[in-house]
């Protein structure tokens, strides 16, 4: 894939009070290039429990390619391609969630716990154009 039709990719995971922040960060890093920076922000849940928000934004084309190469290893990548109409919003953002527990074990699988948001390039910026560009990119994986 020569060019990457994404402006950036955001990845985010929450580490709740019952979880080890370092372990959750290692799970998030399953999708990231080795030198990616992970930012931490502390928050509080509804009942006063501590939540650590781990996030990163990748804007470099090589870094975005790395994340997409991880997405390509999904067993059900074809299903993701078929669901693009439901996964891209009117702001040309593509959403996908991954299983945090599987990532803790080094496995890439869809599920809950890690959220990917990728801004799809489309000129003009239309949802239909973004869907087509994302489809082309995912088919090239």
Image (cartoon, helix red, strand yellow):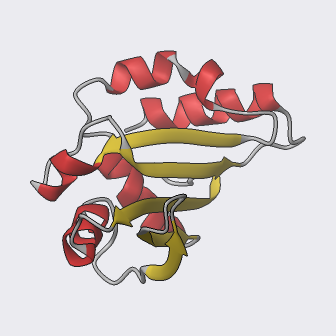
Q: Hey, which residue is sitting farthest right in the picture?
A: 124
Q: Hey, which residue is sitting farthest front in the picture?
A: 47
Left or right of 49? Residue 136 is right
Residue 19 image point, x, y percent: 23, 65
Q: How many marks?
A: 0
Q: Nearer the viewer, residue 40 or 29?
A: 40
Residue visible at 21% across and 72% down in the picture? 20
Query: Is residue 78 at all visible to an observer of this figure?
Result: yes
Q: 117 above or below 130?
A: below
Q: 75 above or below 119?
A: above
Q: Nearer the viewer, residue 138 or 45?
A: 45
Left or right of 74? Residue 60 is right
Residue 122 image point, x, y percent: 78, 42
Left or right of 71? Residue 108 is left
Quadrant occupied by the C terminus? top left
Residue visible at 42% across and 41% down in the picture? 97
Residue visible at 19% across and 70% down in the picture? 23
Q: Nearer the viewer, residue 35 or 43?
A: 43
Q: 4 above or below 33?
A: above
Q: 19 above or below 121?
A: below
Query: Is residue 5 at all visible to an observer of this figure?
Result: no
Residue 129 image point, x, y percent: 77, 31
Residue visible at 35% across and 64% down in the picture? 16
Residue 137 image point, x, y percent: 52, 38
Q: Hey, which residue is sitting farthest left in the picture?
A: 105
């Amino acid at each position: 894939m020569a060019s990457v039709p994404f402006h950036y990719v955001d990845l985010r995971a929450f580490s709740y009070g019952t979880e080890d922040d370092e372990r959750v960060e290692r799970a998030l890093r399953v999708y990231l290039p080795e030198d990616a920076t992970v930012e931490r922000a502390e928050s509080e849940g509804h009942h006063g429990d501590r939540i650590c928000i781990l996030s990163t934004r990748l804007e470099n084309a090589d870094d975005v390619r790395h994340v997409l190469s991880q997405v390509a290893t999904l067993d059900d990548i074809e299903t993701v391609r078929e669901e693009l109409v439901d996964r891209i919003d009117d702001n040309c953002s593509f959403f996908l969630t991954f299983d945090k527990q599987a990532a803790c074990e080094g496995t890439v699988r869809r599920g809950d716990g890690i959220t990917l948001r990728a801004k799809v390039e489309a000129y003009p910026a239309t949802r239909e154009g973004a869907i087509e560009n994302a489809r082309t990119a995912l088919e090239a994986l």
